[in-house]
Image (cartoon, grey):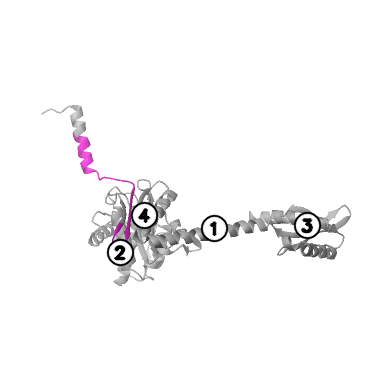
Amino acid sequence: MHLSFFGIAFVLSMTLAISTPAFAKYASFVMDADTGRVLHSVNADTRNYPASLTKMMTLFMLFEAIEQKKVSLNTKMRVSRRATWQPPSRLGLKLGATISVEDAIYALVTKSANDVATVVAEALGGTEWEFAKAMTKRAHQIGMKSTNFRNASGLPNRRQLSTARDMALLGNELWKRFPKYYGYFKTQKWKYKGRTYGNHNKLMKTYDGMDGIKTGYIRASGFNLVTSVNRGGHRLIGVVFGGKTSKHRNNIMARILDNAFTKIDPQMMAAYKSNKKAEQAKKAYAIASQRRSTAWGVQVGAYTSIKTARVQAIAAIKRAPSYLTGAKTKVVPLKTGNKKVYRARVVGVEKREAYRACKALKRLRQPCMVFRDKTQVAMKR
């Protein structure tokens, strides 16, 4: 039987389609950590590249090893040549050096260090390949049926795949199984050998109740994130795969978590939003008030002695208490030719109050001029 060129092309394309896993790139998922109820799901079971979300499983294996007393937090793990070859993100560990288990945990949670992931894999599995096989086996045992690991870091490998649902399952297992160690995921900063490393999960700083878990990125995956949030007595696990940027990913996560909390407890969420708006308004007013009150002042004359200038500044506050109460006096020297004078000033008022104060003082035949306090402006900048 003879096939045309187009027939052969069709057969080849179908073969590739069957053998190549389906990638959604974008996927998102939210579940109630206590009940397992699914609150949001988009492409939840389509396989994608987990990137550094892989390190969640590496930490799962490490926490289990600690509980089984195979290692302790103080155990030193040696750095191999293979570990030193791992690309960024990395600590830059030297061949033959050691790192403690606890420092390795911090390095994976904050810096997401690939060299440290290899060190952990080799310490627990002998080789990273054997450790990855053990990771996959353990993942399947806890219900992550669509997940396969080929390394401990999440560096690119086309056979290293997972789903949003599986990663949510893993996040939930980490929280439930390891209450003693789960707290490491909320670490904001970690100091190691004179350097400070910040957590890549910036959303923890802005989304109330978020206490972990892990970010991930490679070019093929986009920006990934698994989070755990406890608010109003409800804990949710959220997952986003394939964000266009870290900001885009974080915005999606915040939105789907808000919607999920509203489904669970609409009254709690409504009250939370109302309180949040009130807090934001109060904070904005305080900032605006501070900015207004520190940039302006009035000058009530220039005198040949410091004492006279200070007395006149104090007198100005007493003469216009409605506008200058709470302001501070300030004497500023000025040299003109061979003479030196001292300017009597009242500072720390907003622009409108400064003009009103001058108007009131001029009615009392007190010389007055409004000025902007440049030192205060410089401080704000």
Q: Earlier in the sequence, mark 3 or mark 4?
A: 4
Q: Which of marks 1 and 3 is nearer the N terminus?
A: 1
Distance between mark 1 and mark 4 Cα atoms: 38 Å
Question: What residue did someone put label 4 on?
Answer: 52
- What's under tag 2, amino acid-wise? Glu
Q: Which of marks 2 and 1 is nearer the N terminus?
A: 2
Report whether 374 appears left or right of 219.
right
Question: What residue did someone put label 1 on?
Answer: 281
Q: Nearer the viewer, residue 150 or 43?
A: 43
Q: Nearer the viewer, residue 30 or 140?
A: 30
Mark 3 or 2, which is nearer the eye? Answer: 3
Query: Dot 1: what SS?
Result: helix
Mark 1 in CB contact with mark 4 (< 8 angstroms): no
Magenta stretch: give its range.
11-38
Q: Earlier in the sequence, mark 3 or mark 2?
A: 2
Report whether 300 appears left or right of 149.
right
Question: What residue did someone put label 3 on?
Answer: 360
- What's under tag 3, amino acid-wise? Ala
Give the residue drawn at x 59%, y 60%.
286
Distance between mark 2 and mark 1 Cα atoms: 38 Å
Mark 2 or 1, which is nearer the eye? Answer: 1
Place of residue 273 in the rendered image (x, y in percent of width and height, measured from the top left): 45, 59
Q: Which mark is residue 173?
A: 2
Classify residue 167 by image quadrant: bottom left
Query: Dot 3: what SS?
Result: helix
